[in-house]
Image (cartoon, helix red, strand yellow):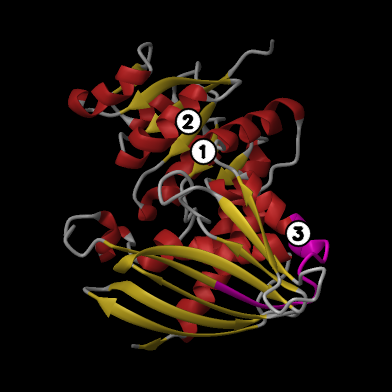
Amino acid sequence: MPEPIRWGILGAANFAREHMGPAIHAAEGAELAALATSSVTKAAPFQAFAPGLRLHDSYEALLADPAIDAVYIPLPNHLHVEWALRAMQAGKHVLVEKPATLREPEFEQLIAARDAAGVLAAEAYMIVHHPQWQRARELVQSGAIGRLRHVSGKFSFDNREEVDNIRNRAETAGGALRDIGVYVFGSARFVTGEEPQEISAQIEWENGVDVLSNVQARFPGFVYTAYVSTRMHPYQEMVFHGEAGVLRVTTPFNARVFGEAQLELHSAAASGAAAGQVTTERFPMADQYKLQVEAFGRSIREGTPYACPLEFSRGTQSMMDQVFAVATSL
C-alpha cells in the first residue's frame, strides 16, 4: 500500500469540523495529520475523531511542517488566494474552499504558482466527484433528453439572523453569489461543457452583500435561468430540459443533508401516453466530500486527471464576475 497523503487544515472552521475534517479522516489513502489553530477549545472536536492530530499554533507553522503533504484551506473568502499561494510556495498540494478567488484574473496567480511548484491545486468543488453529477453529465451529453433547450438552477437558505456570519459581512467577501452561486453556475457548465455568451442579472443588496441574485444567460446550445439567495426558505434544484425529456436533480448540492441524492429522468412513455414516464436513480450512500479527497489523492499519486482543475473553476468565477458587472439592483 502506498503511503497516505498527509493533510493539514488551516483554521478550525465549522465547515472543516463538520464535513471536510471527517472526510479527510475517513478517506482511503488520506490521513488527517495536523490542524493550525491557537484555540485548544476549537481543536478539541477535531481531536475527538482524529486522536493523533498534531496542533500548530499558526498557519505558518503548519506550512513549515515537513510531514504535511497537502493543505485544506477553509478560511474566509478574502484570504483564499493569499494562503493558497503561500501553501504552494511551501511545496504543499492545495485544496482551497470555493470561491478560490474573488476575481477571475487572480486564477493566473494560482495557476502559475501551481505549475512552478509542481503541485496539485484545486478549488474544493465537491459536487463534480459525486456519482449523481457524473451520471447527469453522461445522460445529457449522450442525448437521453434530446436536444437541450433550457437549464434552470435554484439554491437558497436563510441566514439573516446570523449577523456575525462571514457570509453576511462585506469585509470578508460574503454574499450569496460567492457562497452558493458557484453551484448553480458550475454545475450547468460541468454537465453541458458550454460557457455563457450573454448574461443579465438583478441583485438585491443588504449591508454591502448580495442576498438575492436572479440570473439569465444564453449559452451556445440553450437558455439558462437561476437564482440564489441567503434570505429565502431553504431549497435547491437543477433542471435540464430537452426536446425529448427532462432531467431533474432534486438534491444537487447538499446530498445527505438537504435530502437523498436523486436523478429524475422524465421521458416519453413507450406507449405514447401523454404523461410519459419517470425513472429515478438514487445515490444514498455517496459522500461527495470523501470522494473529493480520494480523487485528489489519486491525482497526486497516480496522475489521474482531476475533475475540477483550476482552469474549470476559473470559468465559474468568470461567469460570476460577469454577473456582478452587469447586474441591476432589485
Q: Residue at x 70, y 33 (%)?
A: 299
Q: CA distance from mark 3 to mark 2?
A: 28 Å
The residue that mark 2 highlights is: 23
Residue 144 forms part of the magenta stretch = yes
Q: CA distance from mark 3 to mark 1?
A: 23 Å
Mark before the other along the chain sequence, 3 or 2: 2
Q: Which residues are magenta?
A: 138-152
Which callout, 3 or 2, points to the residue nearer the camera? 3
Location of residue 319 by image quarter: bottom right
The residue that mark 1 highlights is: 289
The residue that mark 3 highlights is: 139
Name the foreground residue: 17 vs 102.
Answer: 17
The crowd level at tag 3 (other Cα within 10 Å; few <14, some 14-19, many 20+) is some
Asked if 314 appears above or below 25 in the picture, the reply is below
Asked if 100 appears above or below 193 in the picture, the reply is above
Q: In the image, residue 249 lies at what x, y percent?
A: 58, 60
- Amino acid marked by disc 3: Leu
Residue 7 visible to an observer of this rendering: no
Residue 105 visible to an observer of this rendering: yes
The crowd level at tag 2 (other Cα within 10 Å; few <14, some 14-19, many 20+) is many
SS type, badge 2: helix
Q: Residue at x 50, y 17 (%)?
A: 66
Asked if 111 appears above or below 327 in the picture, the reply is above
